[in-house]
Amino acid sequence: MRIGIVGCGLIGGKRAKSAAGHTIAYVCDTNQQRAEALAASHDATVMPDYQALVKADIDMVIVATTHDMLAPITLAALEAKKHVLVEKPAALNTNEIAQMIEAAEKNHRLVKVGFNHRFHPALKKAHEICASGKFGDILFIRAKYGHGGRIGYEKEWRCDKELSGGGELIDQGSHLIDLSRWFMGDLTLDYAKCPTSFWNIKVEDNCFLSLSGANGSTAWLHAGWTEWKNIFCFEIMCRTGKLMIEGLGGSYGTETLTIYAMKPEMGPPDVEVIRFEGADESWNLEFVDFTDAIKHEKRPCGDIYDAMENLKIIEKVAAL
């Protein structure tokens, strides 16, 4: 496939690398130096703006910009009849998502949303185990996800509501909501609290959510920008076993899946620990899933419809 990338920062670079075997034909960025650097590393051509890029001879557009530009660029690409891989949350609100869905269906193009956490090996393995029914129904999910702080954090674009659409809820919180929906199905909001605990900013730096799934199951989620050390922990409690995913590689620590299997006599469970060493392959696996969906004309894992359900919950929290 021939691909154009809008947004040549850290994530745009990761997306370009994940497309190995395909052609990065064009790139663009409001920062010309970033665009030129990414173009040089992939023998691509720098376009003056996204409007020109989406009209070029390409099959797919990857959108890796600040949140305020995700929907406008995606809409332009869809109207140009290009498939789109857009970073989460895909838009600022459900109205923008609805326009994107309409454009995608009208032009018969797919929109994959960057929910790459679904493709981390520990989470994929845990999902397979839950789907098999080995440990019975899911009783609850308990999860925490957080960034460590850094000097000047309050001046970054994620803390500017006009650019980001919100704070930690729409940032890391949206990953936790998406993963919970992936495991539990449709969710409804029971409780939310989104304080600004530390940073001098106009958006929340922490979010606490309680979501309900089918048959009384619960997802209790906490995402925060006040961890001081990056953290990821996702626990899935089933009727006869528990699955715990810790770490995402890199600064989050080695990705690990711990499986606690209940014994017939109960008591201390059997414990199996699986460690996933090495580089983060989630970006590559997510890209493969999208190209396979395009080839076989099927829904990719984590798409525009999932983004809509995600933003519905976020908007309900914001309305409280």
Image (tube, grey):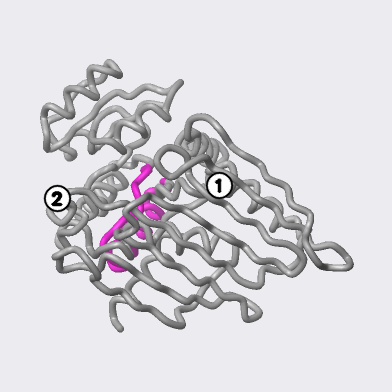
Foreground mark, 2 or 1, reads: 2
Which residue in the rendered view is the most extreme toward the front? 268
Mark 2 vs mark 1, CA separation in Å: 43 Å
- Residue at 39% from the left image edge and 61% from the top image edge: 174
Q: Residues within 10 Å of mark 2 (few under 14, many from 20)?
A: few
Q: Which mark is residue 9?
A: none
Q: Which mark is residue 298?
A: 1
- Residue 259 shown left or right of residue 156 in the figure: right
Which residue in the rendered view is the most extreme toward the right? 265
Q: Is residue 154 above or below residue 61?
A: below
- Residue at 48% from the left image edge and 30% from the top image edge: 279
Q: Earlier in the sequence, mark 2 or mark 1?
A: 2
Q: Could you say which is closer to the camera, residue 219 or residue 149?
A: 149
Mark 2 — residue? 152
Residue bounds of the magenta highlight: 84-109
Decide whether residue 257 is among the magenta residues: no
Q: Is residue 45 above or below residue 82?
A: above
- Residue 276 shown left or right of residue 200 in the figure: right
The amino acid pointed to by label 2 is Gly
Q: Position of residue 63 (x, y in %)?
A: 29, 42
- Residue 253 shown left or right of residue 256 in the figure: left
Quadrant of the rendered image containing residue 260:
bottom right
Q: Position of residue 82 (x, y in %)?
A: 34, 40
Decide whether residue 95 is among the magenta residues: yes
Q: Position of residue 316 (x, y in %)?
A: 35, 78
Kindly tell me whether residue 305 is visible in this rendering: no
